[in-house]
Image: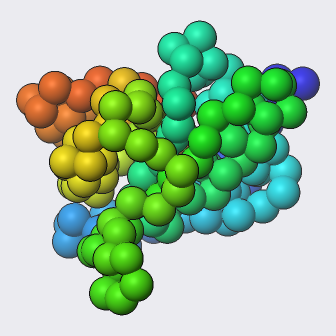
Amino acid sequence: MDYRKRLKELIRERALKVADEPIFKLSSGKMSNYYLDLRTITLDPEGGYLIGNLIYEMVKDKKPDALGGLTLGADPIAYATSLISFINKNPIKPFVVRKEPKGHGTGKQIEGNVKPGESVFILEDVVTTAGSSLKACKVAKDFGLNILGVIALVDREEGGEENLRKEGFELISVFKVSEFLKK
């Protein structure tokens, strides 16, 4: 099965919303005439299977200990990839980065079985300016994790890759938005 081809079909069918005018507000506050609602894919059994296989193939040779990112966008990607890694007898742990430290209990901002010194990938569903990715990178780095790179399902090609590079992080994307839109 061509996982990438099928995932691209699902994104076109379910996740990509396009309007004639900029009616979609992005997390950056910017208005856009298109929106990628990737949760319709990441929170779907087939989508999770495709994503888990694709991301696992992308990272397995780099031997990360774990992968995760800012909740909620990264969570299903981390879980799917972790499950596929286990099936392939090469377990890669998932972890979650909370937007803020937990207000009770242990007060953690990173949840999961990761330890300082481990090598990780930061995951993202969609990267625009990379604000969420950079926040996750900062929390992970402050925790003591070694960041191998940032992996996004879709790069909107609006400066995120450059912003990550400025901070010393590589962006690896499954798709560029230009593969879906006629510019």
Quarter assignment of residue 39: bottom right
From this view, report whether residue 35 is shown above or below residue 102.
Answer: above
Quarter assignment of residue 167: top left
Q: Is residue 54 left or right of residue 1?
A: left
The structure residue drawn at horizontal position 62% and vertical position 18%, both measured from the top left corner, is 60
90 or 46, nearer to the observer: 90
From this view, report whether residue 92 is shown above or below residue 100.
Answer: above
> Could you say where residue 52 lies in the image, as x and y percent from the top left?
71, 39
From this view, report whether residue 109 is shown above or below residue 60.
Answer: below
Whether residue 39 is visible to the viewer of this picture, yes or no, is yes
Extreme right residue here? 1
> Could you say where residue 69 lies in the image, as x and y percent from the top left?
42, 52
Which corner quadrant holds the N terminus? top right
The structure residue drawn at horizontal position 84% and vertical position 57%, both measured from the top left corner, is 45
Q: Is residue 64 left or right of residue 89?
A: left
Which corner quadrant holds the C terminus? top left
13 or 101, nearer to the observer: 101
Whether residue 23 is visible to the viewer of this picture, yes or no, is no
Q: Is residue 90 left or right of residue 63?
A: right
1 or 15, nearer to the observer: 1
Quarter assignment of residue 115: top left
The structure residue drawn at horizontal position 59% and vertical position 11%, both measured from the top left corner, is 61
> Could you say where residue 122 lies in the image, as x and y percent from the top left?
41, 41
The structure residue drawn at horizontal position 19% and vertical position 48%, both measured from the top left corner, is 142
> Could you say where residue 155 lies in the image, as x and y percent from the top left?
39, 39
